[in-house]
């Protein structure tokens, strides 16, 4: 009887997840019984995410609550990443409302799987047990495989799903192998117990081997080099809303797992894992930016550039200070808005032209000024240019946290980041220049005058693009507020004190 009471009392802290479960059940069953009223499914899905986000925000003041014997911990890190995931899910649903004609008859199932992926990331954010961690990762992986192959009649979508399935299967085996070492060494699956036992042992070859095995799975989720091989083909072949979710929603899950495992569980081995993560960051920044230069497809360019952005974000993780992790969280928020906005622009353009080639965007400003302007703001921020300065501040904070390490590794990371930012500026601004300066391409010339009222297929993505641009602009003027929230979110992690301070006192 006491156990039932304990579970019921724990449910009050799981209201956000319960809202999502209710929306998942509705999306799964509504189209089955009422196929002609399919327009209600995305609206209820968005309502479920909004209610989940509102419930999470109410829980933000909570310091730390362990549920179900330590399987799940509700703290500010859980809430912070949960809010980010809800924002991503909401924007992706808006994007999908203009893409539904490519999903066939199973639209309800698409929203159900997408909401399940959002729920999986939220569970990952609060996982403090190896069993819960594995269940959350596998749930997210299965959802991503299903979403990548949802355009059943598209061979590229089928290929993307198969490649993701084979890659994640191999990674899962490696990850489980690492977890078996970790359990065998400590005799526990609880993060806190493992942390105490590892902290009392001298660094050994076994610990380094465990780190390599676990980082391979985390690197796969983050699509960090050399675990990136799946990303370009999957990003290009998957439905564009799915690509957008993979580029930030799936990565958010990978980053929160990395923060809890590395900064807390393996805190005593920070010297070992910081070198490995630093190498992954350097390779990701170099390879991601150089290969993105040669791309002629916007989606494929964004895929490779996302690999480079992972390298930038990892600098904050390597710093392993309060300011470094807060800078990483701030970068994730801003990067999510920028990247989702760019993919939304790609959907809006493809809906009218059916093209994804960068050259076909030439002269877009003359026919679709609102689309060209919104897409340009997102791309210029991805390049780190201060137009507006949210993306610039994100890079500034991450680079500054690397400098504050006052080590050869920190200076090397920042140096590589600065050098590789130059080609990034080129390939992002190339698209903007084509849209503004060049003569209209054949695709743009064939565009009809903008419709009034707006077509239903364009309304959702236009709202998504507006939300992204508004978020970027708001993040540019409320930098201190966002950074303070990020600092609050990373407080539950036992990390090194900051050597210096980030330049937060901005006008």
Image (spheres, helix red, strand yellow):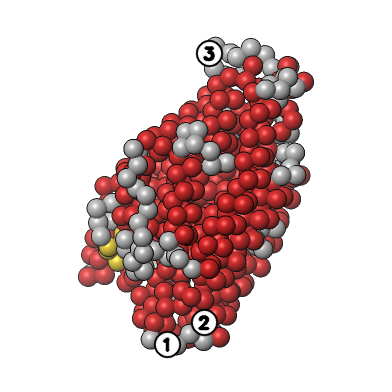
Sequence-wise first label, 2 or 1: 1
Instruction: Indicate the quadrant containing the C terminus: top left, top right, bottom left or bottom right.
Output: top left
Q: Residue at x 49, y 80 (%)?
A: 182
Q: Residue at x 64, y 61 (%)?
A: 283
- Per the model, the C-alpha gap separating discs 2 and 1 is 10 Å
Mark 1 or mark 3, which is nearer to you?
Answer: 1
Front-lying residue, 175 or 197: 197
Identify the secondary structure beneath mark 2. helix
User: Can you tell which quarter of the image residue 198 is in?
Assistant: bottom left
Packing grade of label 2 (10 A; few <14, some 14-19, many >=20) is many
Residue bearing mark 1: 201
Front-lying residue, 113 or 312: 312
Identify the secondary structure beneath mark 3. loop
Residue 87 % position (x, y): 43, 42
Residue 154's tag is none
**Residue 22 visible to an observer of this rendering:** yes
Packing grade of label 3 (10 A; few <14, some 14-19, many >=20) is few
Residue bearing mark 2: 207
- Per the model, the C-alpha gap separating discs 3 and 2 is 61 Å
Q: Residue at x 53, y 67 (%)?
A: 409
- Per the model, the C-alpha gap separating discs 1 and 3 is 67 Å
Residue 453's tag is 3
Residue 299 % position (x, y): 67, 40
Front-lying residue, 385 or 135: 385
Sequence-wise first label, 3 or 2: 2
Residue 177 % position (x, y): 58, 77
Mark 3 or mark 2, which is nearer to you?
Answer: 2
**Residue 92 visible to an observer of this rendering:** no
């Amino acid at each position: 009887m006491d156990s039932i009471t304990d579970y019921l009392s724990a449910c009050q802290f799981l209201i956000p997840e319960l809202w999502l479960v209710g929306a998942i059940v509705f999306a799964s069953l509504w189209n089955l019984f009422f196929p002609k009223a399919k327009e209600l499914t995305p609206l209820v899905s968005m309502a479920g995410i909004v209610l989940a986000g509102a419930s999470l925000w109410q829980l933000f003041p909570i310091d730390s609550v362990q549920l179900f014997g330590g399987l799940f911990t509700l703290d500010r890190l859980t809430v912070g990443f949960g809010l980010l995931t809800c924002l991503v899910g909401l924007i992706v649903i808006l994007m999908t409302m203009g893409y539904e004609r490519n999903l066939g008859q199973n639209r309800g199932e698409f929203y159900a799987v997408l909401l399940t992926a959002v729920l999986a990331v939220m569970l990952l954010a609060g996982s403090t047990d190896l069993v819960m961690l594995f269940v959350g990762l596998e749930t997210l992986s299965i959802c991503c495989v299903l979403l990548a192959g949802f355009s059943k009649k598209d061979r590229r979508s089928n290929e993307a799903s198969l490649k993701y399935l084979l890659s994640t299967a191999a990674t899962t085996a490696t990850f489980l192998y690492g977890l078996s070492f970790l359990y065998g060494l400590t005799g526990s699956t609880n993060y806190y117990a493992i942390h105490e036992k590892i902290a009392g042992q001298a660094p050994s070859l076994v610990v380094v081997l465990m780190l390599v095995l676990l980082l391979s799975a985390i690197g796969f989720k983050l699509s960090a080099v050399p675990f990136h091989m799946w990303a370009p083909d999957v990003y290009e072949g998957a439905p564009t809303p799915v690509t957008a979710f993979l580029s930030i929603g799936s990565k958010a899950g990978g980053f929160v797992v990395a923060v809890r495992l590395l900064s807390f569980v393996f805190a005593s081995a920070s010297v070992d894992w910081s070198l490995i993560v630093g190498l992954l960051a350097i390779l990701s920044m170099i390879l991601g930016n150089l290969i993105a230069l040669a791309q002629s497809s916007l989606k494929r360019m964004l895929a490779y550039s996302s690999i480079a952005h992972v390298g930038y974000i990892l600098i904050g993780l390597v710093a392993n200070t309060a300011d470094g992790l807060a800078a990483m969280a701030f970068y994730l928020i801003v990067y999510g808005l920028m990247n989702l906005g760019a993919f939304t622009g790609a959907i809006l353009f493809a809906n009218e032209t059916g093209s994804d080639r960068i050259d076909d965007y030439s002269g877009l400003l003359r026919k679709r000024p609102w689309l060209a302007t919104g897409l340009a703001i997102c791309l210029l921020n991805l390049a780190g240019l201060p137009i507006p300065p949210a993306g610039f501040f994100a890079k500034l904070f991450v680079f500054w946290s690397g400098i504050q390490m006052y080590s050869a590794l920190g200076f090397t990371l920042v140096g590589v980041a600065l050098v590789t930012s130059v080609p990034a500026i080129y390939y992002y601004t190339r698209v903007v220049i084509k849209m503004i300066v060049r003569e209209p391409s054949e695709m743009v010339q064939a565009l009809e005058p903008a419709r009034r009222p707006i077509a239903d297929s364009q309304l959702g993505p236009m709202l998504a693009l507006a939300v992204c641009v508004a978020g970027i602009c708001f993040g540019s003027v409320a930098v201190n507020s966002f950074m303070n929230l990020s600092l609050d979110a990373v407080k539950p992690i036992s990390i090194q004190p900051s050597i210096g301070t980030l330049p937060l006192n901005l006008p």
